[in-house]
Image (cartoon, rainbow, N blue to C red):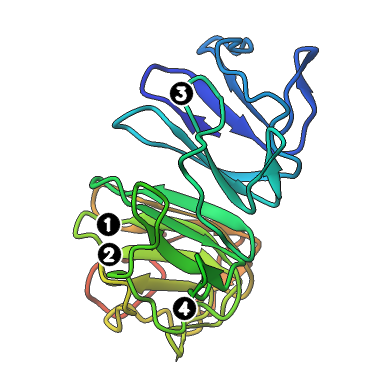
Amino acid sequence: MQLQADGKVLIGGIFSGYNGVPRHNIARLTAAGALDATFNPGSGADGEVAAIAVQPADGKVLVGGYFSAVNGVARRGIARLNANGSLDAAFTPVLDGDVLAILVQPDGKIVIGGTFTAVNGVGRGRIARLNADGSLDTSFNPAAGADQEVDALARQGDGKLVLGGKFTAVGGAARVRIARLRPDGALDTSFDPGAGANWTVFAAALQPDGRVLIGGAFDSVGGVERRGVARLWGDYRTYLPLIRR
């Protein structure tokens, strides 16, 4: 789900209709929960929509997931819709895998995470940044990237990116399902998750004080019992789970 600034709600997933109206895996609701008929994605996505993000500048909608076409047009893993739900034909990045997390930066650039290993023919290990037109931003270079899928993204105020997923290495260094990148894509070695989470991190969010909330299928973080949700220090200190008693 993604909340728009006007209070409308975008939903993605695996469904074929909403309130009896055909909508394939993507729809928009009014603030009251009714289907917003002004947002019509046609035949929608032909597979699960796993990520949604809205571009604040123009209201266009980015969708990622396990699909190969949107409204009958080939789009592997990622597509962009106009504010009325129609496909944005000008946005055509080419991926070899799926997109499971999307984050729009304040400058309009788009960070994506997922299962892909190349973007527009250039190697990118499951994490990449696109320019607003869908071209690859080569100034963001994560080197080897993540060794398994990236499922969650969160951006700090200083431009650093927190990643969550199934991975156990990022940029060639051990990072167990939690990592942080510098704004240029390089691994931030000052953020060390140690033992990390013992299973997949599916969600990440930042508190105003910079601490990091994670959610997922884990039952321990850093060797401390934490079932499904945990909070981490987000500053320069070596990673430790934050424990409140």
Disc 3 and disc 2 in contact, CB within 8 angstroms = no
Residue bearing the label numbered 3: 83
Q: Earlier in the sequence, mark 3 or mark 2?
A: 3
The mark closer to the camera, 1 or 3, is 3
* Residue 77 appears left or right of 170: right
Secondary-structure class at tag 4: loop
Pick the front one: 161 or 197: 161
Residue 160 is marked as 2
Q: Say few, some or many: other residues with alpha carbon within 10 Å of mark 1 (under 14 / 14 to 19 / 20 or more).
A: some
Residue bearing the label numbered 1: 156
Q: Amino acid at mark 3?
A: Ala
* Residue 145 appears left or right of 206: right
Above/below status of 130 relative to 166: above
Above/below status of 231 relative to 71: below
Q: Earlier in the sequence, mark 4 or mark 3?
A: 3
The mark closer to the camera, 4 or 3, is 3
Q: Amino acid at mark 1?
A: Gln
Please name the residue shown 69% across and 31% down the image. 44
Q: Earlier in the sequence, mark 1 or mark 4?
A: 4
Above/below status of 134 relative to 57: below
**Residue 10 visible in this rendered orientation of the protein:** yes
Residue bearing the label numbered 4: 145
